[in-house]
Amino acid sequence: MQAGKKNYAKPLIILWTVCIVMFLYTPMVSVVLASFSKKRYFQFPVVNWTTRWYEKAFESLSVRDLLTTSFSVALLVTVLSVVLAFFGALAFARYDWKGRKLFQKIILLPIFFPQAVLGLALLLWFSVLGITTSWMTAVFAHMVWIVPIVTLIISIQVYSFDPSLEEAAVDMGATRLQTLREVTLPILSPGIISGSVFAFLLSWGNFPLSLFSTGADQTVPEWLYAKMVSGYTPMVPTLGSLMMGGATITLFVSYVAYTLYRGRQKRRLT
Amino acid sequence: MQPGVRAAIPAAAFLLIGFAGPLLMVLGYSFMPPRTFSLAQAPTFANFISIVTDSYYLSFVWSVFLSLIAVALLLVISYPVAYGMAKMFGPWANVVTMIIVVPLLVSENIRLFGWVLVLLKNGIADGSMQLLFGVQLPSLLYTVPAIVLGLVYVYLPFMLFPLVIGLSMVPDTLKEAASDLGASRLQIFREIEVPLAMPGIMIGCMLTFILSLGSLAESKILGGQTVIMIADDIESAFTFAQNWPKGAMLSVILIVFSGSLVFFLFRRIDLDRIIGRR
Protein backbone atom coordinates (compact mmCIF):
# COMPACT_ATOMS: atom_id res chain seq x y z
CA MET A 1 0.00 0.00 0.00
CA GLN A 2 2.85 2.29 0.90
CA ALA A 3 4.48 1.62 -2.46
CA GLY A 4 1.22 2.17 -4.33
CA LYS A 5 0.84 5.60 -2.76
CA LYS A 6 4.38 6.59 -3.60
CA ASN A 7 3.79 5.77 -7.25
CA TYR A 8 1.37 8.56 -7.81
CA ALA A 9 3.17 10.97 -5.49
CA LYS A 10 6.25 10.98 -7.71
CA PRO A 11 4.63 12.14 -10.99
CA LEU A 12 2.78 14.85 -9.04
CA ILE A 13 5.99 16.12 -7.52
CA ILE A 14 7.73 16.08 -10.90
CA LEU A 15 4.83 18.00 -12.43
CA TRP A 16 4.93 20.54 -9.60
CA THR A 17 8.70 20.96 -10.02
CA VAL A 18 8.24 21.62 -13.74
CA CYS A 19 5.61 24.27 -12.89
CA ILE A 20 8.01 25.97 -10.46
CA VAL A 21 10.81 25.99 -13.01
CA MET A 22 8.45 27.55 -15.55
CA PHE A 23 7.43 30.10 -12.92
CA LEU A 24 11.09 30.97 -12.37
CA TYR A 25 11.78 31.47 -16.05
CA THR A 26 8.55 33.30 -17.03
CA PRO A 27 9.83 36.85 -16.43
CA MET A 28 13.08 36.23 -18.28
CA VAL A 29 11.26 34.90 -21.32
CA SER A 30 8.98 37.95 -21.18
CA VAL A 31 11.94 40.33 -21.17
CA VAL A 32 13.50 38.67 -24.22
CA LEU A 33 10.11 38.70 -25.96
CA ALA A 34 9.67 42.42 -25.29
CA SER A 35 13.17 43.21 -26.56
CA PHE A 36 12.19 41.98 -30.04
CA SER A 37 8.87 43.79 -30.14
CA LYS A 38 8.60 46.69 -32.56
CA LYS A 39 6.02 48.68 -30.59
CA ARG A 40 7.32 51.42 -28.33
CA TYR A 41 5.08 50.19 -25.52
CA PHE A 42 4.95 46.47 -25.03
CA GLN A 43 1.78 44.64 -26.02
CA PHE A 44 1.04 40.94 -26.05
CA PRO A 45 0.68 39.11 -28.42
CA VAL A 46 3.62 40.66 -30.26
CA VAL A 47 2.61 41.52 -33.82
CA ASN A 48 5.71 43.07 -35.37
CA TRP A 49 9.20 41.82 -34.63
CA THR A 50 12.38 43.84 -34.93
CA THR A 51 16.05 43.82 -34.00
CA ARG A 52 16.19 47.61 -34.16
CA TRP A 53 16.59 48.06 -30.39
CA TYR A 54 19.65 45.83 -30.40
CA GLU A 55 21.23 47.79 -33.25
CA LYS A 56 20.57 50.98 -31.32
CA ALA A 57 22.05 49.48 -28.16
CA PHE A 58 25.25 48.45 -29.92
CA GLU A 59 25.68 51.88 -31.49
CA SER A 60 25.00 53.81 -28.31
CA LEU A 61 28.02 55.20 -26.47
CA SER A 62 26.19 55.50 -23.16
CA VAL A 63 25.32 51.79 -23.29
CA ARG A 64 29.01 51.07 -23.83
CA ASP A 65 29.85 53.18 -20.76
CA LEU A 66 27.30 51.35 -18.64
CA LEU A 67 28.59 47.95 -19.72
CA THR A 68 32.21 49.00 -19.11
CA THR A 69 31.39 50.19 -15.59
CA SER A 70 29.45 47.03 -14.74
CA PHE A 71 32.21 44.85 -16.17
CA SER A 72 35.08 46.64 -14.37
CA VAL A 73 33.27 46.49 -11.05
CA ALA A 74 32.46 42.80 -11.45
CA LEU A 75 36.00 41.88 -12.50
CA LEU A 76 37.68 43.68 -9.59
CA VAL A 77 35.14 42.32 -7.12
CA THR A 78 35.82 38.79 -8.36
CA VAL A 79 39.61 38.97 -8.03
CA LEU A 80 39.63 40.65 -4.62
CA SER A 81 36.77 38.57 -3.15
CA VAL A 82 38.28 35.26 -4.19
CA VAL A 83 41.61 36.08 -2.52
CA LEU A 84 39.97 37.13 0.75
CA ALA A 85 37.47 34.27 0.64
CA PHE A 86 40.12 31.62 -0.06
CA PHE A 87 41.88 32.33 3.25
CA GLY A 88 38.53 32.94 4.91
CA ALA A 89 37.36 29.48 3.86
CA LEU A 90 40.50 27.85 5.27
CA ALA A 91 39.76 29.54 8.59
CA PHE A 92 36.08 28.58 8.24
CA ALA A 93 36.49 24.88 7.59
CA ARG A 94 40.11 23.68 7.41
CA TYR A 95 41.83 24.70 10.64
CA ASP A 96 40.68 24.02 14.16
CA TRP A 97 41.15 27.17 16.15
CA LYS A 98 39.59 28.76 19.15
CA GLY A 99 37.43 31.45 17.59
CA ARG A 100 36.26 29.34 14.64
CA LYS A 101 32.58 28.94 15.55
CA LEU A 102 32.29 32.67 16.18
CA PHE A 103 34.13 33.47 12.96
CA GLN A 104 31.74 31.22 10.99
CA LYS A 105 28.75 33.13 12.30
CA ILE A 106 30.21 36.61 11.87
CA ILE A 107 31.31 35.93 8.31
CA LEU A 108 27.78 34.85 7.36
CA LEU A 109 26.02 37.88 8.85
CA PRO A 110 26.29 40.14 5.76
CA ILE A 111 24.49 37.49 3.67
CA PHE A 112 21.50 37.71 6.01
CA PHE A 113 21.59 41.48 5.99
CA PRO A 114 19.13 43.54 3.90
CA GLN A 115 21.19 44.82 1.01
CA ALA A 116 19.43 48.15 0.58
CA VAL A 117 20.10 49.03 4.21
CA LEU A 118 23.70 47.86 3.87
CA GLY A 119 24.10 50.10 0.82
CA LEU A 120 22.76 53.11 2.71
CA ALA A 121 24.93 52.38 5.75
CA LEU A 122 27.96 52.24 3.45
CA LEU A 123 26.94 55.51 1.81
CA LEU A 124 26.85 57.11 5.25
CA TRP A 125 30.21 55.53 6.11
CA PHE A 126 31.89 56.81 2.95
CA SER A 127 30.56 60.31 3.42
CA VAL A 128 31.68 60.46 7.06
CA LEU A 129 35.13 59.23 6.05
CA GLY A 130 35.20 61.88 3.31
CA ILE A 131 35.45 59.39 0.42
CA THR A 132 33.75 60.46 -2.82
CA THR A 133 31.61 57.62 -4.12
CA SER A 134 32.40 56.24 -7.57
CA TRP A 135 32.59 52.81 -9.19
CA MET A 136 35.55 52.04 -6.91
CA THR A 137 33.46 52.44 -3.76
CA ALA A 138 30.89 50.19 -5.44
CA VAL A 139 33.59 47.50 -5.64
CA PHE A 140 34.06 47.83 -1.90
CA ALA A 141 30.30 47.73 -1.25
CA HIS A 142 29.76 44.64 -3.42
CA MET A 143 32.60 42.88 -1.63
CA VAL A 144 30.97 43.28 1.78
CA TRP A 145 28.17 41.07 0.49
CA ILE A 146 30.09 38.85 -1.93
CA VAL A 147 33.15 37.90 0.19
CA PRO A 148 30.92 35.99 2.66
CA ILE A 149 29.11 34.19 -0.15
CA VAL A 150 32.34 33.12 -1.85
CA THR A 151 33.78 32.09 1.53
CA LEU A 152 30.77 29.84 2.02
CA ILE A 153 31.12 28.31 -1.46
CA ILE A 154 34.84 27.60 -1.09
CA SER A 155 34.26 26.28 2.46
CA ILE A 156 31.99 23.56 1.11
CA GLN A 157 34.95 22.38 -0.97
CA VAL A 158 37.34 22.72 1.98
CA TYR A 159 35.22 20.41 4.13
CA SER A 160 35.97 17.56 1.75
CA PHE A 161 39.70 18.36 1.76
CA ASP A 162 42.04 15.93 3.50
CA PRO A 163 44.58 17.95 5.58
CA SER A 164 47.03 15.03 5.63
CA LEU A 165 47.80 15.75 1.95
CA GLU A 166 49.27 19.11 2.96
CA GLU A 167 51.19 17.50 5.81
CA ALA A 168 52.58 14.87 3.46
CA ALA A 169 53.84 17.59 1.10
CA VAL A 170 55.55 19.41 3.99
CA ASP A 171 57.08 16.15 5.25
CA MET A 172 58.53 15.53 1.82
CA GLY A 173 60.29 18.88 1.94
CA ALA A 174 57.91 21.26 0.16
CA THR A 175 57.99 24.89 1.28
CA ARG A 176 54.81 26.51 2.47
CA LEU A 177 54.38 28.35 -0.85
CA GLN A 178 54.97 25.15 -2.84
CA THR A 179 52.41 23.29 -0.76
CA LEU A 180 49.88 26.05 -1.37
CA ARG A 181 50.53 26.11 -5.11
CA GLU A 182 50.93 22.41 -5.81
CA VAL A 183 48.56 20.80 -3.30
CA THR A 184 46.02 23.12 -1.71
CA LEU A 185 45.08 25.26 -4.73
CA PRO A 186 44.59 22.41 -7.25
CA ILE A 187 42.46 20.40 -4.84
CA LEU A 188 40.30 23.39 -3.98
CA SER A 189 40.08 24.62 -7.58
CA PRO A 190 36.45 23.50 -8.17
CA GLY A 191 35.33 25.58 -5.21
CA ILE A 192 37.50 28.53 -6.24
CA ILE A 193 36.18 28.45 -9.80
CA SER A 194 32.53 28.25 -8.81
CA GLY A 195 33.20 30.94 -6.21
CA SER A 196 34.65 33.26 -8.88
CA VAL A 197 31.75 32.65 -11.26
CA PHE A 198 29.29 33.48 -8.49
CA ALA A 199 31.27 36.55 -7.45
CA PHE A 200 31.36 37.87 -10.99
CA LEU A 201 27.71 37.28 -11.78
CA LEU A 202 26.36 38.47 -8.44
CA SER A 203 28.31 41.70 -8.79
CA TRP A 204 27.33 42.04 -12.47
CA GLY A 205 23.65 41.86 -11.58
CA ASN A 206 23.66 43.62 -8.22
CA PHE A 207 21.30 46.52 -7.84
CA PRO A 208 20.64 47.54 -4.19
CA LEU A 209 24.32 47.98 -3.27
CA SER A 210 25.22 49.76 -6.50
CA LEU A 211 22.29 52.16 -6.15
CA PHE A 212 23.84 53.87 -3.13
CA SER A 213 27.54 53.36 -3.68
CA THR A 214 28.37 54.28 -7.29
CA GLY A 215 28.03 58.05 -6.99
CA ALA A 216 28.17 59.68 -10.42
CA ASP A 217 28.99 56.40 -12.20
CA GLN A 218 26.18 54.08 -13.19
CA THR A 219 25.98 50.32 -13.63
CA VAL A 220 23.51 48.64 -15.98
CA PRO A 221 21.08 47.46 -13.25
CA GLU A 222 20.92 51.00 -11.88
CA TRP A 223 20.21 52.45 -15.31
CA LEU A 224 17.50 49.85 -15.89
CA TYR A 225 15.88 50.73 -12.60
CA ALA A 226 15.97 54.46 -13.31
CA LYS A 227 14.30 53.87 -16.67
CA MET A 228 11.73 51.47 -15.26
CA VAL A 229 10.60 53.99 -12.67
CA SER A 230 10.56 56.99 -14.97
CA GLY A 231 10.93 57.29 -18.72
CA TYR A 232 10.45 53.78 -20.06
CA THR A 233 12.21 53.04 -23.34
CA PRO A 234 12.33 49.77 -25.32
CA MET A 235 16.04 49.79 -24.47
CA VAL A 236 15.07 48.45 -21.02
CA PRO A 237 14.16 44.93 -22.19
CA THR A 238 16.97 45.06 -24.76
CA LEU A 239 19.68 45.87 -22.25
CA GLY A 240 18.07 43.44 -19.81
CA SER A 241 18.33 40.69 -22.42
CA LEU A 242 21.95 41.64 -23.14
CA MET A 243 22.71 41.35 -19.40
CA MET A 244 21.14 37.89 -19.32
CA GLY A 245 23.06 36.96 -22.45
CA GLY A 246 26.29 38.06 -20.80
CA ALA A 247 25.53 35.96 -17.72
CA THR A 248 24.68 32.91 -19.83
CA ILE A 249 27.90 33.20 -21.85
CA THR A 250 29.97 33.58 -18.66
CA LEU A 251 28.37 30.48 -17.16
CA PHE A 252 28.73 28.46 -20.34
CA VAL A 253 32.35 29.44 -21.01
CA SER A 254 33.42 28.77 -17.42
CA TYR A 255 31.65 25.41 -17.47
CA VAL A 256 33.37 24.36 -20.72
CA ALA A 257 36.76 25.66 -19.56
CA TYR A 258 36.37 23.80 -16.30
CA THR A 259 35.45 20.52 -18.00
CA LEU A 260 38.48 20.82 -20.31
CA TYR A 261 40.74 21.62 -17.35
CA ARG A 262 39.44 18.63 -15.40
CA GLY A 263 39.98 16.35 -18.40
CA ARG A 264 43.56 17.53 -18.82
CA GLN A 265 44.28 17.06 -15.11
CA LYS A 266 42.93 13.52 -15.20
CA ARG A 267 45.09 12.67 -18.23
CA ARG A 268 48.14 14.07 -16.45
CA LEU A 269 47.53 11.84 -13.46
CA THR A 270 46.99 8.62 -15.42
CA MET B 1 50.15 32.45 15.69
CA GLN B 2 47.76 29.61 14.89
CA PRO B 3 47.30 29.07 11.12
CA GLY B 4 43.54 29.38 11.55
CA VAL B 5 43.86 32.84 13.05
CA ARG B 6 46.23 33.93 10.31
CA ALA B 7 43.82 32.73 7.60
CA ALA B 8 40.90 34.48 9.29
CA ILE B 9 42.56 37.89 9.51
CA PRO B 10 42.08 39.26 5.95
CA ALA B 11 38.36 38.52 5.72
CA ALA B 12 37.72 39.48 9.33
CA ALA B 13 39.58 42.77 8.97
CA PHE B 14 37.71 43.55 5.78
CA LEU B 15 34.33 42.95 7.41
CA LEU B 16 35.38 45.07 10.37
CA ILE B 17 35.92 48.04 8.04
CA GLY B 18 33.15 47.28 5.58
CA PHE B 19 30.42 45.91 7.81
CA ALA B 20 30.93 46.61 11.53
CA GLY B 21 32.12 50.19 10.91
CA PRO B 22 29.12 51.35 8.87
CA LEU B 23 26.68 49.65 11.27
CA LEU B 24 28.19 51.36 14.31
CA MET B 25 27.98 54.62 12.40
CA VAL B 26 24.29 54.04 11.72
CA LEU B 27 23.76 53.24 15.39
CA GLY B 28 25.50 56.49 16.34
CA TYR B 29 23.41 58.57 13.95
CA SER B 30 20.15 57.11 15.22
CA PHE B 31 20.70 58.97 18.50
CA MET B 32 21.48 62.34 16.91
CA PRO B 33 18.89 65.13 16.74
CA PRO B 34 16.68 64.95 13.60
CA ARG B 35 17.95 66.56 10.37
CA THR B 36 21.55 66.92 11.49
CA PHE B 37 24.62 65.65 9.66
CA SER B 38 27.26 65.40 12.34
CA LEU B 39 27.91 62.83 15.05
CA ALA B 40 29.28 65.36 17.54
CA GLN B 41 26.05 66.30 19.28
CA ALA B 42 24.25 65.43 22.46
CA PRO B 43 22.46 62.10 21.99
CA THR B 44 18.67 62.12 22.04
CA PHE B 45 15.79 59.67 21.73
CA ALA B 46 13.80 62.06 19.53
CA ASN B 47 14.01 59.74 16.50
CA PHE B 48 12.76 56.71 18.36
CA ILE B 49 9.84 58.67 19.77
CA SER B 50 8.87 59.81 16.27
CA ILE B 51 8.08 56.19 15.29
CA VAL B 52 4.88 56.44 17.25
CA THR B 53 4.10 60.10 16.74
CA ASP B 54 4.75 60.16 12.98
CA SER B 55 3.28 56.70 12.31
CA TYR B 56 6.41 55.17 10.80
CA TYR B 57 5.38 51.94 12.44
CA LEU B 58 2.88 51.52 9.57
CA SER B 59 5.54 50.68 7.01
CA PHE B 60 7.07 48.30 9.51
CA VAL B 61 3.75 46.55 10.09
CA TRP B 62 3.23 46.24 6.32
CA SER B 63 6.69 44.77 5.88
CA VAL B 64 6.18 42.16 8.61
CA PHE B 65 2.73 41.31 7.27
CA LEU B 66 3.81 40.88 3.64
CA SER B 67 6.93 38.95 4.66
CA LEU B 68 4.90 36.53 6.79
CA ILE B 69 2.54 35.86 3.87
CA ALA B 70 5.49 35.36 1.54
CA VAL B 71 7.21 32.93 3.93
CA ALA B 72 4.02 30.87 4.41
CA LEU B 73 3.46 30.65 0.65
CA LEU B 74 7.12 29.83 0.03
CA LEU B 75 7.07 26.99 2.54
CA VAL B 76 4.02 25.39 0.95
CA ILE B 77 5.27 25.91 -2.62
CA SER B 78 8.86 24.77 -2.04
CA TYR B 79 8.29 21.78 0.22
CA PRO B 80 7.21 19.28 -2.49
CA VAL B 81 10.03 20.41 -4.79
CA ALA B 82 12.56 20.11 -1.95
CA TYR B 83 11.22 16.67 -1.12
CA GLY B 84 11.60 15.60 -4.71
CA MET B 85 15.15 16.95 -4.88
CA ALA B 86 16.21 15.34 -1.60
CA LYS B 87 14.53 11.98 -1.98
CA MET B 88 13.24 11.24 -5.48
CA PHE B 89 15.18 12.78 -8.32
CA GLY B 90 18.51 11.07 -7.63
CA PRO B 91 21.15 12.28 -10.10
CA TRP B 92 18.56 14.63 -11.67
CA ALA B 93 18.56 16.67 -8.46
CA ASN B 94 21.82 18.29 -9.55
CA VAL B 95 20.30 19.32 -12.87
CA VAL B 96 17.28 20.81 -11.10
CA THR B 97 19.65 22.67 -8.73
CA MET B 98 21.51 24.17 -11.69
CA ILE B 99 18.25 25.20 -13.38
CA ILE B 100 17.08 26.95 -10.21
CA VAL B 101 20.42 28.65 -9.47
CA VAL B 102 20.78 30.25 -12.92
CA PRO B 103 17.99 32.86 -12.47
CA LEU B 104 19.71 33.98 -9.25
CA LEU B 105 22.59 35.20 -11.37
CA VAL B 106 20.33 37.52 -13.36
CA SER B 107 19.79 40.94 -11.85
CA GLU B 108 16.79 41.06 -9.53
CA ASN B 109 15.29 44.09 -11.21
CA ILE B 110 15.47 42.56 -14.68
CA ARG B 111 13.48 39.60 -13.41
CA LEU B 112 11.00 41.85 -11.63
CA PHE B 113 10.68 43.89 -14.79
CA GLY B 114 9.75 40.64 -16.55
CA TRP B 115 6.81 40.36 -14.15
CA VAL B 116 5.85 43.94 -14.96
CA LEU B 117 5.57 42.85 -18.60
CA VAL B 118 3.45 39.87 -17.56
CA LEU B 119 1.09 41.81 -15.30
CA LEU B 120 0.86 44.99 -17.37
CA LYS B 121 -2.40 46.03 -19.01
CA ASN B 122 -2.21 44.45 -22.48
CA GLY B 123 0.78 42.54 -21.11
CA ILE B 124 1.34 38.80 -21.32
CA ALA B 125 -1.29 37.68 -18.79
CA ASP B 126 -3.92 40.13 -19.95
CA GLY B 127 -3.09 39.65 -23.65
CA SER B 128 -3.31 35.87 -23.54
CA MET B 129 -6.61 35.97 -21.63
CA GLN B 130 -8.02 38.27 -24.31
CA LEU B 131 -6.67 36.04 -27.06
CA LEU B 132 -7.92 32.76 -25.57
CA PHE B 133 -11.14 33.68 -23.78
CA GLY B 134 -11.87 37.23 -24.85
CA VAL B 135 -11.89 38.52 -21.26
CA GLN B 136 -10.12 41.60 -20.04
CA LEU B 137 -8.31 41.17 -16.73
CA PRO B 138 -8.53 43.81 -14.03
CA SER B 139 -5.34 45.78 -13.38
CA LEU B 140 -2.81 43.40 -11.83
CA LEU B 141 0.22 45.61 -11.54
CA TYR B 142 0.75 47.96 -8.57
CA THR B 143 -1.31 45.87 -6.17
CA VAL B 144 -0.47 44.16 -2.88
CA PRO B 145 -0.69 40.63 -4.40
CA ALA B 146 1.82 41.76 -7.04
CA ILE B 147 4.31 42.64 -4.28
CA VAL B 148 3.76 39.24 -2.64
CA LEU B 149 4.29 37.57 -6.02
CA GLY B 150 7.58 39.46 -6.36
CA LEU B 151 8.74 38.42 -2.89
CA VAL B 152 7.80 34.78 -3.45
CA TYR B 153 9.46 34.81 -6.84
CA VAL B 154 12.74 36.42 -5.80
CA TYR B 155 13.26 34.48 -2.57
CA LEU B 156 12.11 31.01 -3.69
CA PRO B 157 15.64 29.55 -3.94
CA PHE B 158 16.45 30.82 -0.44
CA MET B 159 13.61 28.70 0.93
CA LEU B 160 14.12 25.76 -1.39
CA PHE B 161 17.81 24.99 -0.83
CA PRO B 162 17.73 25.02 2.99
CA LEU B 163 14.68 22.73 2.78
CA VAL B 164 16.59 20.34 0.52
CA ILE B 165 19.46 20.22 3.02
CA GLY B 166 17.01 19.71 5.88
CA LEU B 167 15.07 16.94 4.17
CA SER B 168 18.19 15.10 3.08
CA MET B 169 19.13 14.88 6.76
CA VAL B 170 16.09 12.63 7.36
CA PRO B 171 17.17 8.97 7.11
CA ASP B 172 14.84 6.83 4.98
CA THR B 173 15.32 3.82 7.23
CA LEU B 174 13.65 5.65 10.10
CA LYS B 175 10.55 6.31 8.03
CA GLU B 176 10.42 2.71 6.83
CA ALA B 177 10.71 1.50 10.41
CA ALA B 178 7.85 3.76 11.48
CA SER B 179 5.76 2.57 8.58
CA ASP B 180 6.45 -1.08 9.45
CA LEU B 181 5.32 -0.38 12.98
CA GLY B 182 2.01 0.88 11.61
CA ALA B 183 2.44 4.66 11.52
CA SER B 184 0.25 6.48 9.00
CA ARG B 185 1.74 8.79 6.36
CA LEU B 186 0.56 11.83 8.29
CA GLN B 187 2.13 10.50 11.48
CA ILE B 188 5.43 9.85 9.71
CA PHE B 189 5.34 13.35 8.29
CA ARG B 190 4.51 14.98 11.60
CA GLU B 191 6.58 12.91 13.99
CA ILE B 192 9.67 12.06 11.93
CA GLU B 193 10.10 14.07 8.75
CA VAL B 194 9.30 17.57 10.05
CA PRO B 195 11.22 17.35 13.35
CA LEU B 196 14.33 15.93 11.71
CA ALA B 197 14.23 18.42 8.83
CA MET B 198 13.64 21.28 11.30
CA PRO B 199 17.10 22.93 11.01
CA GLY B 200 16.59 23.30 7.25
CA ILE B 201 13.00 24.47 7.64
CA MET B 202 14.06 27.05 10.20
CA ILE B 203 16.94 28.38 8.13
CA GLY B 204 14.68 28.65 5.08
CA CYS B 205 11.91 30.48 6.94
CA MET B 206 14.25 32.86 8.76
CA LEU B 207 16.31 33.62 5.68
CA THR B 208 13.32 34.38 3.47
CA PHE B 209 11.60 36.34 6.24
CA ILE B 210 14.62 38.53 6.87
CA LEU B 211 15.33 39.08 3.19
CA SER B 212 11.66 39.98 2.50
CA LEU B 213 11.62 42.32 5.46
CA GLY B 214 14.50 44.33 4.04
CA SER B 215 13.40 44.21 0.40
CA LEU B 216 13.19 47.39 -1.63
CA ALA B 217 12.88 46.56 -5.32
CA GLU B 218 9.73 44.38 -5.12
CA SER B 219 7.52 47.04 -3.58
CA LYS B 220 8.97 49.76 -5.82
CA ILE B 221 8.81 47.96 -9.16
CA LEU B 222 5.71 45.78 -8.73
CA GLY B 223 3.89 47.73 -6.04
CA GLY B 224 4.22 51.26 -7.36
CA GLN B 225 3.29 53.39 -4.38
CA THR B 226 0.48 51.13 -3.12
CA VAL B 227 2.36 50.10 -0.01
CA ILE B 228 5.42 51.68 1.56
CA MET B 229 7.70 49.03 3.02
CA ILE B 230 10.30 49.74 5.69
CA ALA B 231 13.25 49.79 3.27
CA ASP B 232 11.37 52.41 1.20
CA ASP B 233 11.04 54.61 4.24
CA ILE B 234 14.71 54.19 5.10
CA GLU B 235 15.76 55.04 1.57
CA SER B 236 13.65 58.18 1.32
CA ALA B 237 14.85 59.36 4.74
CA PHE B 238 18.46 59.12 3.60
CA THR B 239 17.94 60.53 0.11
CA PHE B 240 14.96 62.87 -0.57
CA ALA B 241 14.27 63.90 3.01
CA GLN B 242 17.97 64.29 3.89
CA ASN B 243 17.15 63.21 7.43
CA TRP B 244 20.01 60.86 8.26
CA PRO B 245 19.16 60.36 11.95
CA LYS B 246 15.65 59.25 11.04
CA GLY B 247 16.87 56.82 8.38
CA ALA B 248 19.46 55.54 10.84
CA MET B 249 16.82 55.01 13.51
CA LEU B 250 14.60 53.00 11.13
CA SER B 251 17.62 50.94 10.06
CA VAL B 252 18.53 50.24 13.68
CA ILE B 253 15.04 48.94 14.38
CA LEU B 254 15.13 46.71 11.30
CA ILE B 255 18.62 45.46 12.15
CA VAL B 256 17.82 44.74 15.80
CA PHE B 257 14.65 42.91 14.80
CA SER B 258 16.26 40.76 12.09
CA GLY B 259 19.47 40.43 14.08
CA SER B 260 17.74 38.90 17.07
CA LEU B 261 16.06 36.37 14.76
CA VAL B 262 19.44 35.42 13.25
CA PHE B 263 20.92 35.21 16.74
CA PHE B 264 18.22 32.76 17.86
CA LEU B 265 18.71 30.72 14.72
CA PHE B 266 22.50 30.54 15.06
CA ARG B 267 22.21 29.44 18.67
CA ARG B 268 20.17 26.44 17.69
CA ILE B 269 22.07 25.12 14.68
CA ASP B 270 25.54 23.77 14.05
CA LEU B 271 26.97 25.11 10.80
CA ASP B 272 29.63 22.39 10.54
CA ARG B 273 26.95 19.72 10.48
CA ILE B 274 24.73 21.44 7.93
CA ILE B 275 27.34 22.69 5.45
CA GLY B 276 30.07 20.11 5.85
CA ARG B 277 27.92 17.18 6.97
CA ARG B 278 30.62 15.69 9.08
Image (cartoon, helix red, strand yellow):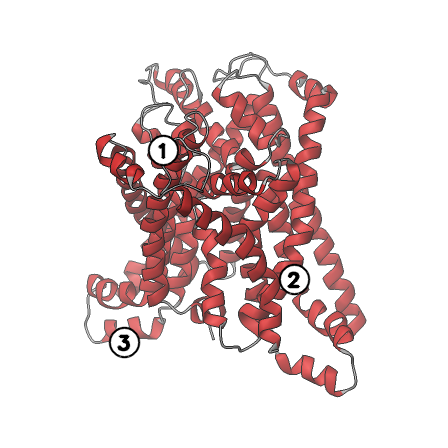
Crowd tier of the residue under label 1, counting other residues whose Cα lies within 10 Å: few below 14, some 14–19, many 20 or above: many
Image depth: mark 2 or mark 1 in front: 1
The CA span between labels 2 and 1 is 51 Å
Kindly identify which residue carries mark 2: A190
Quadrant in the picture for residue A54: top right
The amino acid sitting under disc 1 is Pro
Q: What secondary structure is found at the residue carrying circle 2?
A: helix
Q: What secondary structure is found at the residue carrying circle 3?
A: helix
The amino acid sitting under disc 2 is Pro
Q: Residue at x 70, y 28 (%)?
A: A65
Q: Is residue B138 left or right of residue B89?
A: left
Quadrant, the N terminus of chain B: bottom right
Chain of residue at mark 1: B
- Residue A145 appears in the picture as rendered: yes
Kindly identify which residue carries mark 1: B34
Q: Position of residue A3 (x, y in %)?
A: 31, 64
Q: Position of residue A76 (x, y in %)?
A: 69, 46
What's the mark number on residue B177? 3
What's the mark number on residue A228? none
